[in-house]
């Protein structure tokens, strides 16, 4: 059984504070709709993308300019057999300074290759994080729905 969680990283010239702020503006980079808050410890929000994806997250770590963790408390992925594959997983954003740049390491802890949604979900995360979130950090402009 392969238990390696999905992870990706990139570096930008912007400050850790700007990266942190962009992550917390999830509506600006994560295609879909939100109900609730994403920008404080203990906040809870619902995320939905059309009829394909629903999940509920709770912000369980919130360290300014350093780390954010969203714990998935409920999920329904309509395109896989086990609809709640995301439930109990953690979406982790770690921010650090490296070589004069700011690195963002994104990990979806628990999203592993044994999951039926791994390929589709990791491809979506790659695009959302490495393109939409990175563009939001660099430009400050909300990003379009990448799946439209």
Image (cartoon, helix red, strand yellow):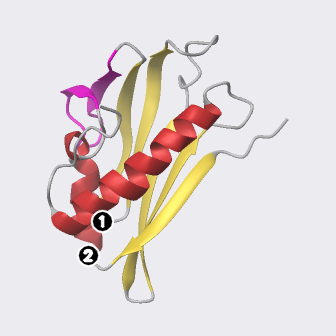
Q: Can residue 68 be seen in this view?
A: no
Q: Is residue 14 left or right of residue 128?
A: left
Q: Where is residue 119 in the image (x, y as percent from the top left)?
A: 62, 36
Q: Position of residue 39 (x, y in %)?
A: 22, 44
Quadrant holding the C terminus? top left
Residue lying at the far bottom in this picture: please name it: 99
Q: Is residue 99 visible?
A: yes
Residue identifier under label 1 = 65
Q: Residue at x 28, y 27 (%)?
A: 45
Name the residue: 53% across, 35% down.
Answer: 121
Coordinates of residue 104 in the picture (x, y in percent): 42, 64
Relative to 35, 122 lies left or right: right
Residue name at image x 37 percent, y 64 percent: 66
Residue range of the region highlighted in magenta in the rendering:
32-50
Nearest the viewer among 61 and 130 is 130
| CA neighbours of label 2 inside 10 A, class few (<14), some (14 to 19), many (20+) | some
The secondary element bearing badge 2 is classed as loop
| Residue contact at pointers 1 and 2, CB within 8 angstroms | yes
Which residue is under mark 2?
15
**Residue furthest to the front:** 148
Q: Residue furthest left?
A: 141
Q: In which quarter of the image is residue 36?
A: top left
**Residue 138: which disc?**
none
* Horizontal side of residue 29 vs 78, given as left or right: left
Is residue 114 shown above or below 2?
Answer: above
Tell me, yes or no, whether the highlighted magenta stretch contains residue 35: yes
Q: Looking at the image, is 42 positioned above or below residue 133?
A: above
State the SS at label 1.
Answer: loop
């Amino acid at each position: 059984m392969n238990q390696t969680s999905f992870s990706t990283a990139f570096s930008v010239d912007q400050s850790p504070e700007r990266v942190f702020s962009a992550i917390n503006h999830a509506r600006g980079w994560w295609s879909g709709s939100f109900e609730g808050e994403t920008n404080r410890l203990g906040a809870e929000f619902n995320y939905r993308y059309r009829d394909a994806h629903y999940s509920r997250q709770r912000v369980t770590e919130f360290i300014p300019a350093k780390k954010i963790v969203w714990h998935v408390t409920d999920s329904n992925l309509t395109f896989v057999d086990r609809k709640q594959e995301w439930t109990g997983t953690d979406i982790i954003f770690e921010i650090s300074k490296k070589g004069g740049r700011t690195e963002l390491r994104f990990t979806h802890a628990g999203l592993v290759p044994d999951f039926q949604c791994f390929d589709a979900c990791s491809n979506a995360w790659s695009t959302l994080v490495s393109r939409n979130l990175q563009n939001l950090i660099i430009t400050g402009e909300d990003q379009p729905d990448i799946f439209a």
